[in-house]
Image (cartoon, coloured by chain):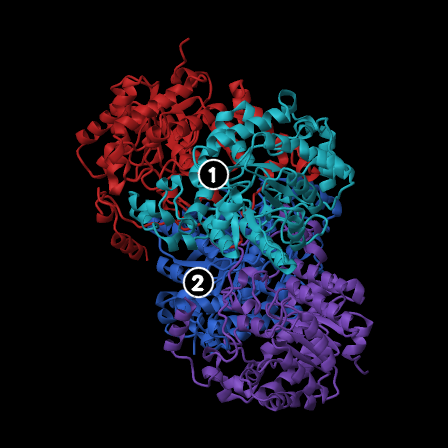
Chain colours: A purple, B blue, C cyan, D red
Amino acid sequence: MVKKGILERLAEGVVIGDGGFVFALEKRGYVKAGPWTPEATCENPEAVRQLHREFLRAGSDVMQAFTFYASDTKLENRGNEAGQKFTGKNINKAACDLAKEVAAEGDALVAGGLSQTPTYLSASSKSDVQKDFRNQIKVFVENKLDFLICEYFEHVEEIEIAIGVCKETGKPIAATMCIGPEGDLHGVSAGDCAVRMVKAGANIVGVNCHFDPFTSLKTIKLMKEGLEKAGLKAYLMCQPLAYHTPDAGKQGFIDLPEFPFGLEPRVTTRWDIQRFAREAYELGVRYIGGCCGFEPYHIRAISEELEKERGRKAVATSKHDAWGGGLVMHTKPWVRARARRDFWENLQPASGRPFSAALSKPDDWGVTAGSDILKQQAAATTKEEIQKLVNFKK
Amino acid sequence: MVKKGILERLAEGVVIGDGGFVFALEKRGYVKAGPWTPEATCENPEAVRQLHREFLRAGSDVMQAFTFYASDTKLENRGNEAGQKFTGKNINKAACDLAKEVAAEGDALVAGGLSQTPTYLSASSKSDVQKDFRNQIKVFVENKLDFLICEYFEHVEEIEIAIGVCKETGKPIAATMCIGPEGDLHGVSAGDCAVRMVKAGANIVGVNCHFDPFTSLKTIKLMKEGLEKAGLKAYLMCQPLAYHTPDAGKQGFIDLPEFPFGLEPRVTTRWDIQRFAREAYELGVRYIGGCCGFEPYHIRAISEELEKERGRKAVATSKHDAWGGGLVMHTKPWVRARARRDFWENLQPASGRPFSAALSKPDDWGVTAGSDILKQQAAATTKEEIQKLVNFKK
Amino acid sequence: MVKKGILERLAEGVVIGDGGFVFALEKRGYVKAGPWTPEATCENPEAVRQLHREFLRAGSDVMQAFTFYASDTKLENRGNEAGQKFTGKNINKAACDLAKEVAAEGDALVAGGLSQTPTYLSASSKSDVQKDFRNQIKVFVENKLDFLICEYFEHVEEIEIAIGVCKETGKPIAATMCIGPEGDLHGVSAGDCAVRMVKAGANIVGVNCHFDPFTSLKTIKLMKEGLEKAGLKAYLMCQPLAYHTPDAGKQGFIDLPEFPFGLEPRVTTRWDIQRFAREAYELGVRYIGGCCGFEPYHIRAISEELEKERGRKAVATSKHDAWGGGLVMHTKPWVRARARRDFWENLQPASGRPFSAALSKPDDWGVTAGSDILKQQAAATTKEEIQKLVNFKK
Amino acid sequence: MVKKGILERLAEGVVIGDGGFVFALEKRGYVKAGPWTPEATCENPEAVRQLHREFLRAGSDVMQAFTFYASDTKLENRGNEAGQKFTGKNINKAACDLAKEVAAEGDALVAGGLSQTPTYLSASSKSDVQKDFRNQIKVFVENKLDFLICEYFEHVEEIEIAIGVCKETGKPIAATMCIGPEGDLHGVSAGDCAVRMVKAGANIVGVNCHFDPFTSLKTIKLMKEGLEKAGLKAYLMCQPLAYHTPDAGKQGFIDLPEFPFGLEPRVTTRWDIQRFAREAYELGVRYIGGCCGFEPYHIRAISEELEKERGRKAVATSKHDAWGGGLVMHTKPWVRARARRDFWENLQPASGRPFSAALSKPDDWGVTAGSDILKQQAAATTKEEIQKLVNFKK
């Protein structure tokens, strides 16, 4: 039996994405924060397989091959050791195999992803950037993945190049930028970004990462309005953070002091995510998933909120009754009294941290492309360089 | 080669426990909140195995068989369906096999655990309670587990019975109560609880669950003082929550309105846990692990803080440089500037939730043993019963 | 010697206003919250005189006669007893006398104020509204006050009428609306409001009340841009709340649940106000004062921040050394260590309220002009009416 | 007609104190924070008279002469200029006159107060300390004040000396220490402090200043238990801060970083104070008033809560209807909907400060009597000394 393609599925209803691999696997002990490279596909395939499987059980319709940032330059950047053991090709081939294996356990599609490259940031020529993307995309074509996702781009110009390269393969293309309502880092508005992505050839457009679910929907709304004004059509897609970031500046959560080792108090609850799923659906978003911070139970929350619209339950819903329903089996009566929707819908959960504020002031260094301290290098960062940065911060 | 036993290891240095299975597997989609029963050992052994493995890689010296609450009465309580598919014996046998399998991949010990029973709460005779415990313990003996843990007891009288039953096996016994500095639910002080557990035969005593790391250390301190005053000796053990609960009342986090589906903002960071590990060690605690909320990276934080004392690194430390060190490889310079101890040690992380307070008022219903609404039953809870509870709450 | 007029003073530099009388006198026991009427000018003139004097000492260049809301209709609204003892004319005459008396103790000007009327809200004809304003203004003319302030208007149309009436007197006119960056309650933008006020004849325009200092400066910025675009010139004026209201909706702090008896944790510090004074000055605001919540020490903070620009010290500065300087005389050394600018400038003061959130959700009933529950009446509100409102709220 | 004495009044019911003069007059521009000396009685008697009058109207039964810290040594400490213009005797005589004048406008008593002296801290002999107190007390005797208050003592030994000196006058003596539940700065328990104060001759004992109302009641409870155990009788008195200080350490709010210029978000609402008045009354406290931060409306809240017990209304209650009742006259219906007890009783007021935490970490320098940096001196503090302290802090 032939699987339905991504565009067919979107035409029929809503498609649920998966969650963020690098953050989940960092917590499980398989990815290093800082380089964030996916050598785990070779080193510990069982851990990657298990995470895919959990998302599949949670209702994901798409298994995205775990290739984030696995370009050879990235594997060697600033002293990363992964580059000495594996090539980007090894890692990405293994990623495709794992995603395909688990997708076949259900009815999921497999997607391959491109994201922003140091090559573009280093202001090389357009053809250099294209070469880099073509190199990465080869493995997706050879492994016959179902469609391509260009994601985590901050500059619309760069994602246009990526979309152009993807178009050469003839596969459906989803394109999401990691921007907020203020638009891309060159000042292009969210609406114009959407228009340019569609004109470049994307079938599905939207945002991923960098901002929380509700901020991301604001961006999507602007994109939708931009497309309508331009008379263009595309499916909308939203894969936000599972962290509350009302205080993030233009570059999102990376600028918050909590990134990446103090984000715990910002993690969204399943109820936050159900609300997000509903609001996204009502806005017309049809590809709804997550990025950093999304764990399997967050994806399940999307599946549960949209159970009626999708006409089916996620496998893992067998372990979760709607709106806290499982608590009717709890031994303490006051916990059983929480087995109801209005309790969880209205809860404003406390942090247990009386010495913490609600919001942080993001780093806002004002350095831009061309600044020395933005340059990448193969050599490890020295203590002196760090001290210089600390002083710069003050 | 023969593995060193738990008491030998404690005599030589510090032993690291594992984290909480029910909460971690609930988020991964394999355990239902409410009944919290461990049928996943039969239904999805690969998920349980993977979690064991992650804790092993994080530095756990003990794999605890995932049998929490798998007594037959519990499997059938208030409409739980698990009891129709599996017996407690099936589930617990599978749990032992999985724990042993992964323990053998490293140099870990395997422990079997007993916890409080509905039988005791229903005020049956002592011999009924003993029978229940003997029944549960059989599988641990047949599977030759290395030692026994009596944990999650709120009444010292009940844990004395449990310890007594464990003593019949001749295996080393660890005993931890889920109490805070106010003592057990009958008003026995923490110090007296420790004394009675040691007198009952426990080799290792302390607390687990219900309270955060720092509140738990306060309890342990009282236990230590109680033992010293009584002239008794025992190893100290602490396996707290990975949630900040300064506002929990006598019964701990279960009484907080956030339990169990809104605890996210309370999750401890790795830096909180490093501080806990250090303070625990300095207090003389030699068995340090976690309970609900502890994910593999929290256990790794213990291993890293005590690396010198233990003379070895956890496997998963290959994916984590101390004090944010991996960030020297980050592409943004302001993130590289966070690659230092004083940054993370002093961070008071924001919640991103301006509509949430720092603390909650716990439920404090004042119902006690004997109250009708505390009685367990096989039938599912009805809507009317829930409405009665909601009204009671007001 | 003749006093310099308000326009001369503004041409030469910055003018400092006074603070909010109704809130300050409510806390001192002379004004009733709810009706907020100023019968204290007759009942307890010494209390009103004392507050004027404190503002004068703090550096106020303007004594505003305490006539807020003293129209006869208001004195009788919904069961207010003040209307039985005094006429608006009595109260307002006494207000003028007190303001003039204290102004003469320094070099201050005296202003008379008009604010929005129930007559306009009841959708009477323009001439009815004009009549109401003419009636109120008479006492200011008879008492030869120095200039007029139209303040606390939510509808630009109404303030245009007020300005028109004031223009008949030939006195300089200041006009401030109680709006935020979203504009007036009919959807007229802040920029357009400024333009229309200037065209109607105001010499000085800006905002007062309803929003905190920093939100108010955002509104002023929009007004300034509107005037520049229209090629108009006017002095800018800002008299905001001394309460932090980042969460207030379109109608400002009145919609916050803390209004008016729980605003304490929102009170600005003197350091907040110094920052406000600096930012206001840099934006080009030349009439800087306060409204509800501003106590004498807040006005002194403005005087101190702008001491150099004004070339003189406020009298009460003899009791306040800059940036906590007086603490060098404290007996405890750690308090002496706080006698420095960077300490106070960077302090984010804690609330001591772990059960409170940072922000509130404002009431947003969506009722508009014409709605029955908005109608004013002479009879006291009944319990039944209140219950109806409480139910409406749910 | 002869006024009833303080002991008679206490025998018959509850007595209401006044609020804190130094903090209120600092905000009004008449007292300098740091030295906190009361030269305003000479410089601006009308301001002191007005504040007395406001407390009288709010229901205070006692006018305390405004002599806080007006000993000659204090007037000259660390560069204070007040000592050059006035003697302690001038200031204190004027203070007595003002208190008596206003007391006569109602039925209030007049009290004179002693508080801790640098003489004791400098470890002089007991007779030196006695001499200092006798010197201060003379003016109270000469002016025939009704009774004496020894207040704001941190060392029970010092207050015993003060009580002893007061006893020589034959007047009734109230004695309150500025301690919390941890007891005095020498480690004497709160219960023992109470016992020793009564044994020294105090008729009324309790606490004032340094801690919030609810923490102070905890201390009073310990005092009450101490007295009961010792078989002693005395009236209980509580005059706490109007600031929330759950996070203050042993020395109270002075150690909090917000002291004294950033305490605004900690100010208690009138509802907090009504709750305090009720809890104090139920604990058996019969002299209930306030200290720093208490404004007239806080004292009125005590009067209103205890209206029935006292059988009379405060004058200023004519400007305040119980539980927000005045809001029935508000023009906006959603504000009228707040005219009810359960609204205000349950409100947890937001701070409007998303960058502030709920609690602060107090300074805890661990310096004790004898430490160099604790020594007082007549010369002004130098910049170098401040820098040394700032470094010490780090």
Between D47 and B346, the one nearer to me in the picture? D47
The quarter of the picture where the N terminus of chain D appears is top left
Between B39 and B323, the one nearer to me in the picture? B323
The answer to whether the residues at label 1 and label 2 have Cβ atoms under 8 Å apart is no
**Residue B18 percent across, percent down from the top left:** 50, 66
Q: Chain of mark 1?
A: C
Residue under label 2, please give it: B288
Between B262 and B228, the one nearer to me in the picture? B262
The residue lying at 75 percent from left, 72 percent from top is A227
* Quadrant assignment, res A1: bottom right
Is residue A40 in view?
yes
Q: CA distance from mark 1 to mark 2?
A: 78 Å
Between D280 and D139, the one nearer to me in the picture? D139
Depicted D222 relative to depicted B167: above or below: above
Depicted B353 relative to depicted A16: above or below: above
Secondary structure under the numbered disc 1 in the rendered image: loop
Q: On the rendered structure, is D394 left or right of A271?
A: left
Q: Which tag is nearer the camera, tag 1 or tag 2?
A: 1
